[in-house]
Each structure stands twice: as C-alpha cells, then as structure tokens.
Amino acid sequence: MRVSLFITCLVDMFQPEVGEATVKLLRAAGCEVSVPLAQTCCGQPAWNSGFAHEAAKVARTTLAALEADGGDAVVVPAGSCATMVRVFWPELFEVVGDHDARIRAEALGKRTYELSEFLAVHPVPLLPLLPEAAAQEVAYHHSCHMLRELRIENQPVDLLGAAGCSAVAWPDDRRCCGFGGLFSVKLPETSVAMADEKLDSLPSDVATLVGSDGSCLMHLRSRLEERGSTVRVRHLAEILAERLPPT
Amino acid sequence: MSGTHSLDGTKLRDRQRDAIADQALGNKVSRGVDIFATRKAGAMAQVGVSHHDGTVGDADELRMAARAMRARTIERLPQLLEQFADNLLAMGVHVHWAADARAANDAILDIAKSIGARTVVKGKSMATEETALNADLEAAGCEVVETDLGEWIIQLDHDTPSHIIAPAVHLDRHDIKRIFDERADAGGIGHDPEVLNAFARKTLRQKFLHADLGISGCNLAIAETGSILLVENEGNGRMCTTLPRVHVAMMGMERIVENWADANLVLNLLARSGTGQPLSSYTNIITGPRRPGDGDGPEEVHVVIMDNGRSRLWGMPQRVSGVSPNGWPCLWVGVLGAHGCSTHAVVGR
C-alpha cells in the first residue's frame, strides 16, 4: 500500500521527530511512504478566523499536492489537520463556491486517515515494555477535533495499551486544552487558564502525557514547564515507534 | 440592556484578562458551570432516536435531527412567518413586524401608551435585552420589573445578564443578600437561599397582581397553530402572560418552527441541554387571547416579530452540512457559554 504523508505545519516545523516516528510506523505497517513536497498548510487558521477565500487558496495547494501523489491513503499525524481535510474542506470549498474542489476534497477525504485510526486497521508489531518502564504512569489527552469531529476515541488508547502503557484514568482527559489555534494568540489568558485547569486534575503519579495533536501538546508542554512539572509530553507516534522491533 | 454595564471603550482582551484574575468570580461561575454540566450529561443520556429497524441512536443523533429541521425551517422562513402571522391574526392577536430594535421598542411603547400602562412585568427575554427595551419603557414613565429571579437580581443591581439561561451566575447568595438589602429594602434579610427566595416571591407577587402589561420572550413560535411556547422554571413566565390584561410577546424572527412535531424535537433537547432537566417546570403554550369561558389569560395579546439584522444572514451561502446560513442552525439551548464551553468555566479559576 502506498501512503502519502501529510506532514502538517507543526510537525514539519517544530516536531520533526514526530514525522520520523510516523514514517517508521507506516513502514512497519508495510506501507510505502511518500511525502509530496508541494504540500503546504491545510488552511485551518484562516478558516477558523472567518477568512474562507484565503483558507481555500491554501487548501487548494495542499489538495492538489496530495491528489497528485496518487497514494492509496493519506495519513496525517494530527487529528486537527485530519479533521480539516475530511470535515471542513468540503464545507470550505462549498462556501467559496468552488464546487469542483469540494467534490475532489470529498474524494480525498474518503482516503484520508488520522495516524492512530490508520494504525488501528494496519497494525504494527509492538514490543512489550520492560517492566520498569511499564510501571511509569501514562495519561492520554483526547483532543477536541479528533474526539468530537472524527470520533476517534479508542484507537489511540488501544495502541498505547498494545505498547504496554495503559493510560491512567484522568477526569479531564476529554476536556479542551485551551490551545484553539489562533485563540491562544488572541486571548492568551483564557487559553492558559484552560490548560492549567485541565492539568490540575492530572494524577500526580503520571510521568508521561501522550496525545495525537502536536498543537495541544505544545500548549500543554509549555504550561507544564512553566508550572515546574517534570511530566514529559510526547506524541503517540513517538511512543509507538520506540516499541517497534529493531529492523 | 437592563443595567448600566457598558462595554464601550473596553477590549475583550482586557476584560477576559481581568475576569481570569478574579478568583472570587471564578469560584461562583465554575460552581454553576459544573452543576449544569453534570446535570446535562445525565439528562442527555436518557434520550435517543428510534430507528425503523428497532435500534436506538444517541442524543447526538437527536441533535443532528434538530439541526436538519432548523435548516429546513430557515429555508422556508418567509412562508412560515406569514403562516404564523395569519394564524395569529385569525385569533385576534395583534402582529407587529419590526425591522430593527427601534421599531420593536416603539411598537411596545405604543401599546404601553395606548393602555396607560404604569407597571410592566417581564418574563425573561433576551430579545428585549437586545433592544434595551427596559430603558425605553422607564423613560416613558413605566415601572419595569424583571420577574425571573436571576433577571430581577441583576436588574436591582443595575447589572446585565452574564448568561442567557443563568443571568446571575456570577453572583452568590451573599451578593444577592446585599443586593436585596441595598436595593429592595429587604431589611437585613438572611442569606439562606430559602429566605432570599421567599423574599423575592413575596415582593414579586404584588408586582404581578398590579401589573398593567406583561411582556415575555418566545422560545418557539409554532406556525401551524399560531402558538407561542415559553419554557421556564419559576412560574413567573406564566404569571406575566396570564395575569395582566395585556400580554406582549417579543420574538426574534428565527424562533419559528413549522409544526408541533418540530417543536417537540426542540423541546426534547432544550431543557436537557440547557439546565439538565427532561423538561422545564413550566412549558407555557399561548394560543390567542382569553376566550369566553376561559378562567384566566390576557384580553389582548400582541406579538412583535423582530428582524434587527437577522435577515442579512438569510441567503448567505449554504453550508454543506445541510444547514442554511452561518449562525442560523443554533438550537437555542443555551449550552454555549454555560457549560458546553470550557472557556466559560475557567473565568477566574
């Protein structure tokens, strides 16, 4: 199976290790991975701010790049960007009156998957954790778009379990982290207060906080650091890639 | 607005920063938010959609059905409003079409003047908050009394509602005791909720009995029967719409539903989402003025159908989700800001 990787802005610019881990996982799942270089952004910041035409301009570029790559599937290591492609692109193109792009976006959306969703049906062999590492508590952050738009809930948690790190119960694991894209820039005080409130209920024995959206993780990581916490924040792909057998 | 809490010259950025820093405010708001959220989860778990094959979908499916109904309704907005108005007129209800806030308030001021109204009692109405009706009525010499408990408290305090279904969620019982003492001559009343409630009940009862005009909002306008539907929990809405000789209902023009089946769909969600109740304590259905032989009800009923910018959204590009213009699919359940949105919950914590 040929997979086109939609790397996303944040992974490309800030978290290349997540991109590397994603490629390792996809290859371990038996896929041939390509990264179409003409891709840019999904257009979400502009779309969320009400700039539909500007968002469509950006989205068209990435749509064309992913289409031209001709993969059997598009995989995205970010729930938020996967949501943009699958849920909001058709709406966006319709709003700006680009019916052709809407039809193309719908077709692409049908073969676009968030990473954990893809791995749930294209399994990778994962080595069990060493006992001392398995004793470390892990919590999972369910991000808004993945949970509430794509309805992806069990897949990442099941994958964590398969890697030997069962997520602990966290009362606010489904609560918004407060990042919200440009929201964090426009109303930073509220954004930060939301992250702090979410983190307040994180069980004290948690050593690692895992999620599937680099944007949420960036926000939560900065708050944890600010609060003097030693909790490590990691993308699910990094955890899983470490459990792959040596090649 | 009922109060003097002006936003002029302030910035959202500054207001949210100040609110976040206000620990006491945060404690009050978060308590309310948490209670609502817990109750909603319980109430929503009780409903679903029955499928033809015998399976049952969850509350989200019900929400999607309501969204689709709203889209269908809004597409036919002009026809449905006409049908609604025709049914009202056939029952002898006066219909006032108001293009903007000024026209809506003027229509109500004319009614007040024509009946020589001195005391006006109001059920909770966000449409009249939108038009700042109270200030206009007071300028015309009327005593205006908000009768929803939360609305009354903030009216006494010259404040504005902090939320559509919980207008006084930013105040606790100690604040309310102070307001009653200072603004309503409660005479050193205690701060137990029962005592505060009893004082409000006793005071407001006299206002209901002596009011010349009752003004209400409108949760739903049912086109097929020309009915106004009002949900509330205190009975004040029922008294505002039955005790005074004249009743005026003010509605935004998007409040319309075609028929009772559609109204039922909204009712299934409204109180569950808003307050976590299967149904509010009172569901008032007003279909025309008092008829011969009726035990109570107003002799004269007016409905003000207000546009005030709403029609500018009508006809904007269709959204693919099947919902008409941006902003219209709102189900009016009051979740946003109350407890559906954690931005509201963090104020002050």
Image (cartoon, helix red, strand yellow):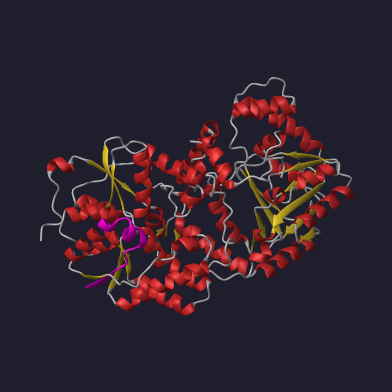
* Residue at the extreme front: A13
Residue displayed at 70% across by 24% down: B181
Residue displayed at 46% across by 50% down: A184
Q: Which one is nearer the viewer's eye here, A89 or B77?
A: A89
- The quarter of the displayed image where residue B196 is located: top right
Magenta region: A1-18
Q: Position of residue B77 (x, y in %)?
A: 66, 67
* Residue at the extreme left: A247
Q: Which one is nearer the viewer's eye here, B234 or A73?
A: A73
* Residue at the extreme top: B188
Q: Position of residue A237 (x, y in %)?
A: 25, 56
- The quarter of the displayed image where residue A10 is located: bottom left
Q: Position of residue B39 (x, y in %)?
A: 48, 42
B337 is within the stretch colored magenta: no
- The quarter of the displayed image where residue B92 is located: bottom right
Asked if residue A198 lies left or right of residue A71, the reply is right
A221 over B154 or under it: above or below: below
Q: Quadrant of the N terminus of chain A?
A: bottom left
A15 is within the stretch colored magenta: yes
Residue displayed at 23% across by 54% down: A238
Residue displayed at 51% across by 62% down: B65
Asked if residue B16 lies left or right of residue A151, the reply is right
A19 over A98 or under it: above or below: above
Camera sees residue B137: yes
Q: Position of residue A146 (x, y in %)?
A: 37, 57
Asked if residue A71 lies left or right of residue B131, the reply is left
Asked if residue A95 lies left or right of residue A78, the reply is right
